Amino acid sequence: MYIHVSMPNPAPASGEICLCAALRRASRAATRLYDERMKSSGLKVTQFSLLRNIGRVGAINVTDLANRLDLERTALGRNLDLLERKGLIRTRGVEGDQRTRLIELTEQGRKAEAAAVPHWRKAQSEMRRRLGKGEFGALGAVLAEMGGATDSI
């Protein structure tokens, strides 16, 4: 693999690398790369992912979206608030259920998502180039299995 992850102490005295710490560092490095490539779209990769998922399922409540993405509701709520302030999503009530609010893309949100796709694809291509095609696919498969992912972004 060719992703550089800076680790002050590559391995503890036992010689065993903490997989959790290495995954977290790699995740931050990958997020930086995607955010940099997507910068001109006006979206961060996390925002793009939310728009993409909401666009795929249509109107969805916060709890179901949090479960789908395996995110804490409060963290998801903060990100959704930002997208709503930008005019990319809207919330609406459900007839007969005052407690449930559905989230859906606005027209502006659909346009922003579509405009961000080429930038996301560039980031994907760069990751594929850095890792090598075989490693890219293998890493994707392992991460999907670990996270229980059943679909792509």
Image (spheres, rainbow, N blue to C red):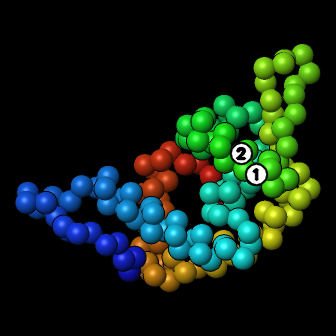
| Towards the viewer: 84 or 11 | 84
Asked if the residues shown at circle 2 and circle 1 are in contact, with their CB atoms under 8 angstroms apart, the answer is yes
| Location of the N terminus (image quadrant) | bottom left
Quadrant position of residue 100: top right
Q: Which mark is residue 80?
A: 2
Q: Position of residue 6 (x, y in %)?
A: 31, 72
Residue 19 in the image: state x and y as whole percent: 28, 55
Residue at image mark 1: 83
Question: As drawn, which residue projects farthest toward the left?
Answer: 13
Give neighbour class at mark 2: few <14, some 14-19, many 20+ (Cα, 10 Å).
Answer: many
Q: Position of residue 15 (x, y in %)?
A: 11, 61
Foreground of the two, 83 or 33: 83
Residue at 86% across, 64% down: 111
User: Would you say residue 7 is visible in this rendering?
Assistant: yes
Residue 59 picture location, percent across and down: 82, 39
Examine the image and state in which quarter residue 21 appears: bottom left
- Identified by mark 1, the residue type is Leu
**Residue type indicated by callout 2:** Leu
Residue for point 67% across, 74% down: 39
Residue 67 in view (yes/no): no
How crowded pointer 1 is (Cα within 10 Å; few <14, some 14-19, many 20+) is rated as many
